Image (cartoon, helix red, strand yellow):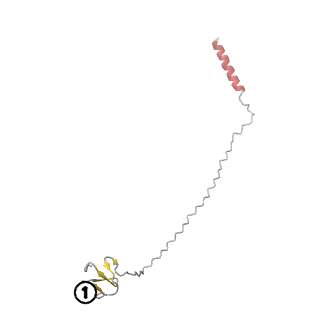
Amino acid sequence: MLKRLSAVLAVAAIGFAVSFASPADAKPVNKNVHVNKTVNVQRNVHVNRTVNVNRNVHVNRTVSTRYVVGQRYNGHIWYGRNRHFWRGRWYAYGVGPCWINVDGLWFWNELDCPI
């Protein structure tokens, strides 16, 4: 009895499935789907990289140093364009072993003739 009941149920299930199937004259379903994937990104970027540097450097190379009488300059003493008295003797400007010529000017050389 159980075998007959299961056979009847199987036939009924097949008939039930066939009854829900689409008829032969049914119109097909349109399954075309349109997806718009157009993305507009505006990437206009303006960067101002103009840099102005003023590199004009003026150097005055003509140096006219005003020496002070009795002051030391690079280990030498400026006594002006006059004679100098050292150890009981007068030495004329630029004459003798105690004077040293530096850039056209005569300085008293303290290394040779210390005070």
Relative to 78, 1 lies left or right: right
Q: Which residue shows up at 28% across the image and 85% down it? A: 85
Q: Please provide percent x and percent y for residue 114.
A: 26, 78
Q: Quadrant of residue 105?
A: bottom left
Q: Which residue in the structure is indicated by mark 1?
A: 89
Query: Circle 1: is it few (<14), some (14-19), or many (20+) Cα within 10 Å?
Result: few
> Which quarter shows the C terminus?
bottom left
34 lies left or right of 67: right
Residue plotted at (70% across, 26% down): 18
Give the image location of residue 99, x and y in percent. Answer: 28, 84
Report whether 58 appears left or right of 69. Answer: right
Task: Name the residue rendered at 67%, 17% in the picture.
Answer: 8
Position in image of residue 90 (x %, y %): 27, 87
Height in image: 6 above or below 66?
above
**Who is closer to the viewer here, 63 or 49?**
63
In terms of secondary structure, where does tag 1 sit?
strand
Q: Quadrant of residue 102?
A: bottom left
Residue type (three-letter) at the residue carrying disc 1: Arg
Q: Is residue 53 above or below residue 80?
A: above
Which of the two residues, 66 or 89, is positioned nearer the viewer here? Answer: 89
Count of marks overlaid on the render: 1
Q: In which quarter of the image is residue 97?
A: bottom left
Vertical relation: 56 (above or below) 41: below
Q: Which residue lies furthest to the front in this view?
A: 88
**The N terminus is located in which quarter?**
top right
